[in-house]
Image (cartoon, rainbow, N blue to C red):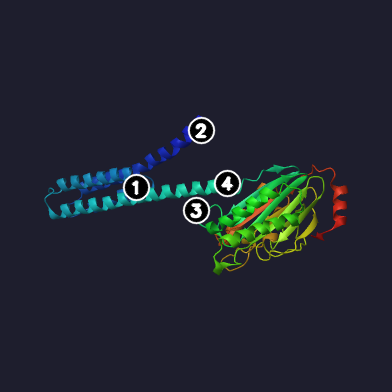
Amino acid sequence: MSPLLRVTGARQPWQSAHALLLLPIMLIVVITVVDMQAPYNVHLGPALVIAPALTPSFAGPRTTAFVGALAIAAQILIGVTHGGLGTLNHIVQIITLTVLSVLVVLYSALRERRQAQLAQVRSVAEAAQHVLMWPLPEHIGPLRIASLYLAAEDEAQIGGDLYAATRYESGVRVLIGDVRGKGLSAIGEAALLLGGFRESAHRHIPLPELAVTLEQSVTRYSAELDPPEEAGERFATALLMEIPDRESVTRMTSCGHPPPLLLSPGHAVSVPSLHPSPPLGVHADSEHTLDVVSFEPGDTLLLYTDGVVEARDARGRFYPLAERVARWTDESPEALMHHVRRDLLAHVGGRLDDDAALIAVHRTAADRHRHHHGRDALRQGSGRH
């Protein structure tokens, strides 16, 4: 950002606050003038408290204190005009206005402190999110990728849902998962799965073996950290996906995770048939299946966590993801994420009860070898490892 833009951006809030400051000052002036011109038995001075009460909505404690002092000075001026400051009525009004102004200033100071704490929490959450879940690149080989993460907890930007993507020898590997629990309490296990995936995904091992590696990490983590009364309660669903650069297929291994949606041009949406194994951490000796699905140029795979499809509206109806995304099959991954985010939040009334994550993976038309390699891979089918 250029210095000129930074100065302009900083100047606009300053100018806005000073423009709003005219409102309480004008109220003080108007109330004071009208009260001084009104009959002796008409008292408008108590209305001066409106001015310092409005100020915290756009300014800090110092400005609020200035407005409060100005209101008190106006009340004193009214008292002098209407018979002097020795009358009991004017003394009570001045004391009352002073006490209320002090309380408003204290409220403004506490509000400013709270805002600073929330800003710090947001910055920490943003830093943690970038450390745990690195931003996905927009382009990897012949793929375009976009992602969306919606945390259920207030002021949190990360939770129990996770995703990652990385290159391996001849393609891209993607992980999406959902650990038990939500929000900040689930971050530890999410970090464990992400670390294990990044450490092993670049190695040229089949996806079922990669799933076994992650299974061992979860089992070891649970054995070392879980208290005895919570033994066996820690688990995670995961979907591992491998997309070769020169084959129009995708290989998947599901560990109890919902299958993705395959979006094809022309508003076509299908659900690949997978053979999921139990979630990671449930059975250490689980057998994992490798499924092969056609993935042609122009297609988009939409991966998601159950926080999306289990989101309910006010009448308890689940979010119909497949039905809704059928309208946007021809959109780019970025536009698709934008539409889903807006539509999902509208469905739930603006607040989710569980973390939600989505990844849109679009294969571009750059793959010139798709038909030959795609048919060969599909002839092999899926097999157990």
Q: Label 4 crowding class (10 Å Cα cut-off): few <14, some 14-19, many 20+?
A: few
Q: Label 1 crowding class (10 Å Cα cut-off): few <14, some 14-19, many 20+?
A: many
Q: Work out how far the residue at label 2 is from the one at label 1, CA to CA, in angstroms.
A: 28 Å
Q: Work out how far the residue at label 4 is from the one at label 3, CA to CA, in angstroms.
A: 17 Å
Is residue 44 visible to the viewer in this orientation of the structure? Answer: no
Q: Nearer the viewer, mark 2 or mark 3?
A: 3
Q: Quadrant of the C terminus?
A: bottom right
Disc 4 element: helix
Mark 3 or 1, nearer chain start:
1
Q: Nearer the viewer, mark 4 or mark 2?
A: 4
Q: Are marks 4 and 2 in contact (CB under 8 Å)?
A: no
Q: Is residue 298 left or right of residue 177?
A: right
Residue 187 or 143: which is nearer the viewer?
Answer: 187
Mark 4 or 3, nearer chain start:
4
Q: Amino acid at mark 2?
A: Leu
Q: Which residue is mark 4?
A: 131
Q: Which residue does the image show at 62% across and 51% down from the upper left?
A: 148
Mark 2 or 3, nearer chain start:
2
Q: Work out how far the residue at label 1 is from the one at label 4, CA to CA, in angstroms.
A: 39 Å
Q: Which residue is mark 3?
A: 155
Q: Which mark is residue 5?
A: 2
Q: Which residue does the image show at 59% across and 67% down from the upper left?
A: 231
Q: Which residue is mark 1?
A: 55
Q: Work out how far the residue at label 4 is from the one at label 2, CA to CA, in angstroms.
A: 29 Å
Disc 2 element: helix
